[in-house]
Image (tube, rainbow, N blue to C red):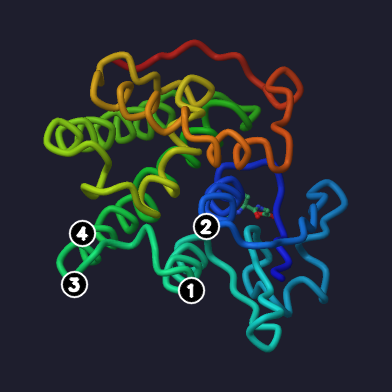
Amino acid sequence: MLDFYTAATPNGYKVSIALEEMGFEYQLKLMNFSKKDQHSPEFTKISPNGKIPTIVDHNNDGFALAESGAILIYLAEKCGKFYGHDDKSRYQVLQWLMFQMSGIGPMMGQANVFYRYMEEEIPAAIARYHNEVHRLFGVMDKQLEKTEFIAGEYSIADMATYPWIFINEWSGTPVDDFPQVQRWMETIAARPAVKTGMNTPPQADPSKIIKSARKIITR
Ligand SMILES: N[C@@H](CCC(=O)N[C@@H](CS)C(=O)NCC(=O)O)C(=O)O
C-alpha cells in the first residue's frame, strides 16, 4: 500500500495516472493548500520542498519520495513497465521526462502565474512564457511526427506531460498549431487509467480558479 499526497493539479495528476496505469494500491491523502497543509512540519518531513505529489511506500519500509519525476521513475522501476525496454529506450524516456520536468512544466507554470494569477498585468512576462511554451509545443509536435508516443512507446514521459498539455487553453497557450500534439492528446485521453487518473482527485471547477480572463496577447 502507498500513501499518495496530492491535490487537483497537473503535477499531482501525473502520479494519479501512473498509479492507475500500473495498478498499485494506494490511499489518497488530499492536501488543502488554502490551509497550508503542504507547509506543516509533518509534511515537510516527507516532502522537503513542501510540495505535492509525494508518496510513502509502506511496502518498502515507509520510504517517502517527493518530486513527480522521481516518483514516476520509482513507480515504473517497481512495476517494470512504462520505462522503455532496453538501455537506449530508457534514456529516451528519461530525455522526454526531463524535457517535461525542466521545460513544459516550469514554463507553463510561469505562464499561469503571469497570465492567470498575478494582479498586475505584465505583458512582457506573459509574452515571454507564452512564446516559450509555444516553442516547446513545436518541439513536441516535431517529435510526435516520428513516434506515436513522446518517447516511442507509451511511457512515464507521456504520463508526466499529458496533465500539463491538458490545461493548454487555460494557460493561454492553445495547441491549435500542433496537429500531432492534438492527435497524441486524443490517444492519451482515451486510456481508461488516464480517465480515472485525471479525476483523482476530481478536477477543480475552472471558473473558480480563474482569477484573470486575459486575452492571449502574444503572436
Ligand atoms: N517539481 C515539483 C513541483 C511540484 C509542485 O509545484 N507542486 C505544486 C502543485 S502543482 C504544489 O505543491 N504547490 C504548493 C505550494 O507551492 O505551496 C514536482 O514536479 O513534483
Inspect the image, locate mark 4, and give the three-letter code of the amino acid beneath it.
Answer: Gln
**Residue identified by numbered label 3:** 87
Looking at this rendering, what residue extends furthest in the right direction? 35
| Quadrant location of the C terminus in the rendered image | top left
**x and y, in percent, of residue 18 in the image:** 52, 53
**Residue 106 visible in the current orientation:** no
Q: Earlier in the sequence, mark 4 or mark 3?
A: 3
Q: Nearer the viewer, residue 117 or 159?
A: 159
**Any mark on residue 78, and which?**
1
Q: CA distance from mark 3 to mark 1?
A: 17 Å
On screen, 13 above or below 181? below
Q: Secondary structure at mark 1?
A: helix
In three-dimensional space, the C-alpha distance between marks 4 and 3, rounded to whole angstroms, equals 9 Å
Circle number at residue 48? none
Q: Which residue is mark 4?
A: 92
In-front residue for pair 127/154:
154
Of the residues shown, which amino acid type is indicated by label 2?
Met
Q: CA distance from mark 3 to mark 2?
A: 21 Å
Helix, strand or loop for disc 2: helix
Dot placed on the residue nearer the N-terminal end, 1 or 2 = 2
Q: Marks 1 and 2, how far apart in space?
A: 9 Å
Which residue is found at the position 37% from the left and 43% from the top? 104
Q: Determine which quarter of the picture holds residue 9.
A: top right
Q: Residue at x 53, y 38 (%)?
A: 194
> What SS does tag 4 mark?
helix
Badge 2: few (under 14), some or many (20 or more) residues near its Cα, within 10 Å? some
- Per the rendering, the mark at residue 22 is 2
Q: Earlier in the sequence, mark 1 or mark 4?
A: 1
- CA gap, disc 1 and disc 4: 19 Å
- Of 188 and 127, which appears nearest the observer? 188
Q: Is residue 9 left or right of residue 215?
A: right
